[in-house]
Amino acid sequence: ILNVEQSPQSLHVQEGDSTNFTCSFPSSNFYALHWYRWETAKSPEALFVMTLNGDEKKKGRISATLNTKEGYSYLYIKGSQPEDSATYLCAFMVAYGNKLVFGAGTILRVKS
Amino acid sequence: DVKVTQSSRYLVKRTGEKVFLECVQDMDHENMFWYRQDPGLGLRLIYFSYDVKMKEKGDIPEGYSVSREKKERFSLILESASTNQTSMYLCASSSRNLRDKETQYFGPGTRLLVL
């Protein structure tokens, strides 16, 4: 059974703080690593899809890095805002299938 | 704008009832998925379908079945609902277009309570 682990489980930060979370995944049979943001009462939406070792992606104040050899990805949020409050999910896709295996998520709460 | 819709946001059913959860996508996607989400466990895959009338078991298929008669519609069926099927159910779809890298697009979820 493939295991994807996310840490921390939850995080409370002040507005303006920068923060980061970790996603660990199996380093074999890698195809892609997805990050999703899930705000309360909304649908999860894709942030990044990363496929190459060393990939770095950026969307506004949010960025992500990927290390497929050691099996981890970091998500960074610079200058957190209350609207960044959400659950951040990472998901691993294996090379031989089209399924995603999700981590349990990191819940971020940003206080103003 | 991509759209995945689910038939209900909230549903309350009794133990033993047959329950249908419907999902419709308007993006002409080949792949469709059903997940359940429980606190601390993340999204767990119940079933998925990569084409009309095709289905494959996910990680937790027991107690569920699915139907995909049309490309845009994927139904999840609880043959005889039980209290341990109380959960949030999410539907998703994705394209096999490599440029899209199989990004999944999610519906808003159905929160099911089985009494």
Image (cartoon, coloured by chain):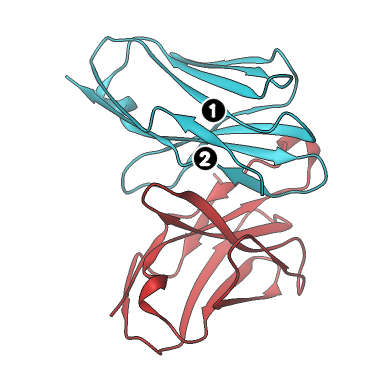
Q: Are marks 2 and 1 in contact (CB under 8 Å)?
A: yes
A94 to A99, vertically: above or below: above
Rendered shade, chain B: red
First in sequence: mark 2 or mark 1?
A: 1
- Nearest the eye: B27 or A7: A7
Image coords of residue B34 (percent x, y)? 57, 62
| Subunit that carries the residue with mark 2 | A
Query: Between marks 2 and 1, how big is the CA–CA gap?
Result: 8 Å
Q: Quadrant of residue A20?
A: top left
* Image-based side of B3 in relation to B54, left or right: left
> Disc 1 is attached to a residue of which chain?
A
Determine which residue is flagged by label 2.
Answer: A103
Q: Amino acid at mark 1?
A: Cys
The vertical placement of B80 against B84, above or below, is below
Which circle marks residue A23 in the picture? 1
- Residue drawn at 61 percent across, 33 percent down: A34
